[in-house]
Amino acid sequence: MALSPSMNEVQVIIVGAGIGGLTAAVDCAGRGLDVLVLERAAAPGGKIATAMVGGKSVDAGPTVLTLLEVFDELFESAGLRREDFVTAVPLDELACHYWPGGSSLSLHSDIEKSAAAIRAFAGAQEERGFRAFCEASGAIYQALRDTFMFHDRPANPLSLMLRGGVSGLSGFTRLDPYRPLAAMVGEHFRDPRLRQLFGRYSTYSGSSPFVAPATLALIAEVERRGVWRIEGGMAAVASGLEQAARALGVRFAYDCEVARVETRAGHVQGVTLAGGERIEAEQVVLNADAAALADGLFGDAPARRTRAFDAGDRSFSAFTVALDARLKGVAPAHHTVFFSADSRAEFDALAAGRMPKEPTVYACFQDRVEGAPPPTGPERALLVLNAPADGDRHAYSAEEIDRCTNNALLTMARAGLSIEMAAPPSISTPSDFARRFPATGGALYGRASHGWMASFRRPGARTAIPGLYLAGGSVHPGAGVPMAALSGRAAVRALVLDRASTSTFRKAATPGGISTPSARTGATA
């Protein structure tokens, strides 16, 4: 696209219009900064995506939204109301879970309803275990909410211990970082189905419950505190953030690929586009996977000062099937999980770089609205299977794609749900995700949360290059839509502090202000 001359010099460039970048744009503009967002795709969203199946738009990326307060606080800080841009409907039924043979269990936002359901499902002892698990996961969440999740990345465990809310060794030990999540879950539940259910929360960060720390039990607490369905689908979150940013004066350039982050004397100077045009900026927020920076995809200078990590440390990728189909059998919820018969075999296969023969399938049935009758005809759904992040080394053949799809349908059929396709599905493999997100191999969550030190190895907002900041699911505080939003706010906190500590920056412009054009002319990118 052709850039206007007024875009040739700005205060803040945000590279990437994913959730982290969009959040940073709203936050920056709300503070009066002149912001330009550059996105190589044709629309905002990043990993939030849609697929057209049978003439219908199907959410084909993240489908679960938690921690709505993150977005409420973002809009409020910018003088806006989230409700004017994004409509969210709370769900009572968080998810329904099925096992081979048809046994099922629904969890609810009301802990008493979940406890009663577990008692009916597996007995009084398992109900007591559930209550103890909720107490433990709730304590982890309370300890880490303000000191870790909503805070800048701690440098090491000691700095975390010294923050308010987690003081001393006893507080850190309460976080249960030294044993796997599967072991912690096994302490509370004897029923193998419940061990499988509560262990799967590690997959929210693309990790195995047999290796990820028990600290990730906090994800269960996050979900219990609320899951929201977004009117218009998850793409409405991205479009709502974009509309809010535009209302604050942010400018957007789509189909606009950044080739290099430019530096001078070790400080960021702006970016150069794939078409050759250079845009000067005082600060740059990179909303891309941190692996792309380390791999040199934004230039040699940033790569030399960025720590890379091995492919073996990647989080899971995914195999997804977006479909329009008629359902027969059991009645799924909006969010439904169909478990495999053997959790250990499933994660062993993933660790060995193979797709499981019998996968667990997460499904979002997007036309299933709580409290409303189910659709009478074909309905939209997204099926998601964990997959190895080997998309840069392995291209999935048509035979493999068919096999993975059929294995997913078989898992669902064992639980009592059959699917009759009304249109050819839209399928994405790790190879497809590797192309969309270069340098990742298709990993969707950055570094896997394996081992007690994993969270401290995840990049923070600041890079080794002054003026260059990171945002997105691969950086602190981690993966997921609200976490990516928190990363965007962390990047803005860092750049605002840096602006205050140096006199080299121009004074902040008013929202919507136009910076002085440089001598360069617009180019197509």
Image (cartoon, helix red, strand yellow):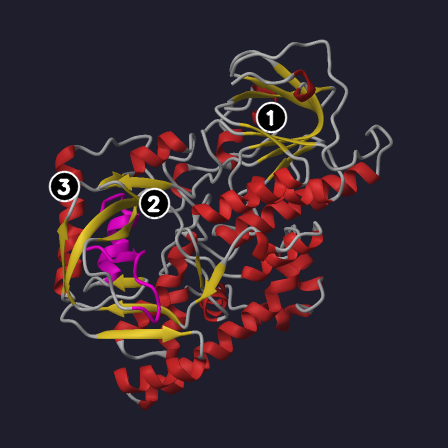
Q: Nearer the viewer, residue 451 or 147?
A: 147
Badge 2, how many Cα within 10 Å: few under 14, some, many 20+? many
The residue shown at (22%, 41%) is: 54
Which amino acid type is shown beneath numbered disc 2?
Answer: Ala
Does dot 2 land on a helix, a strand or a loop? loop
Which amino acid type is shown beneath numbered disc 1?
Answer: Pro
Per the rendering, the mark at residue 60 is 2
* Marked residue nearer the N-terminal end (3 or 1): 1
Residue marked by disc 3: 402
Residue 473 appears anywhere in the view: no
Does dot 3 land on a helix, a strand or a loop? helix
Left or right position of 469 against 406: right
Q: Residue 249 placed where, x, y %?
A: 68, 36
Q: Is residue 367 magenta?
A: yes
Badge 3, how many Cα within 10 Å: few under 14, some, many 20+? few
**Residue at mark 3 to residue at mark 1: CA–CA distance:** 41 Å
Residue marked by disc 1: 302
